[in-house]
Amino acid sequence: MKVLSSIVLLVLLANCCKSQVYYVQDMTTVQIAALDREKTVVLLPGGILEEHGPYLPSFCDGYVNQALTLAIANYIIKKPGWKALIFPIIPLGNGGANEIGRKYSFSGTYAVTQHTLRAILMDLSAELGDQGFKKIIVIHGHGAPNHNQAIDEACEFFRDSYKGWMINIINIAFTYSDEFRNESQQKEDGFTVHAGMQEQSVLYYLKPELAT
């Protein structure tokens, strides 16, 4: 029993000390209140549910944004004393790619209006501001103009109201050189803006279990 108790204690100590990356859904009110507001960056990941054709999942953007969120968090905590507070992903966005073809109802896309997205982020940022948080990063990469305008306006609201900063990381781009594609592959892929070779490659790198 003493050995078991010692092992449990060591595990608990390791979990307390191993990282300065926190997930708000796992924290108590006391733990959240104890965070240093001056050295805590709140990360708000998002991911629109949006059609990606017959071979990519509708949460493609979300998977990419989740990976970017963790990368940003790990970068933040490299600075001594700084912490990253990650929120659960917001699976809401505006302007699915199907709207480009004027298909406003399409399997796989479950979008909200621009005003709804803006209101959600404004309300959430106000809650954070009222609790003393001053630094927020929104990781909600998606190319629709109105989608990004909604995020930008929510960021402006937070900066004006709480005198902190709230940043919208837009148009997450994973670039690659054409030298990695032969001429026939470039022709087949065409002008990639959605669900093409680039996005498929990134997703399958992050989520290999989704590869067909």
Image (cartoon, rainbow, N blue to C red):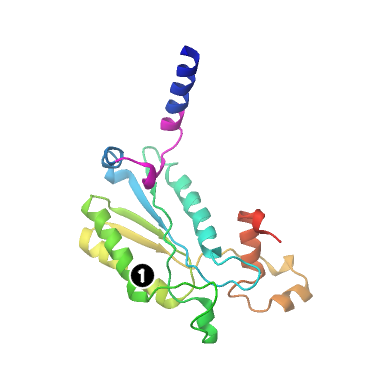
- Give the quarter of the image for residue 60: bottom right
Q: Is residue 88 left or right of residue 71?
A: left
Q: Which residue is drawn at 65% across and 58% down?
A: 210
In-front residue for pair 181/140: 140
Q: Can residue 8 be seen in this view?
A: yes
Question: What range is drawn magenta here?
Answer: 14-28
Task: Tell me where residue 113 appears, x and y as whole percent.
Answer: 38, 76
Name the image quarter holding the C terminus.
Answer: bottom right
Circle 1: is it few (<14), some (14-19), or many (20+) Cα within 10 Å? many
Task: Judge whether 114 appears above or below 8 on screen.
Answer: below
Q: Can residue 84 be seen in this view?
A: no
Q: Which residue is drawn at 48% across and 83% down?
A: 104
Q: Is residue 65 left or right of residue 132?
A: right
- Give the quarter of the image for residue 28: top left
Task: Tell me where residue 73 appears, x and y as whole percent.
Answer: 45, 48
- Secondary structure beneath dot 1 equals helix
Q: What residue would you read off at disc 1?
A: 117
- Give the quarter of the image for residue 13: top left
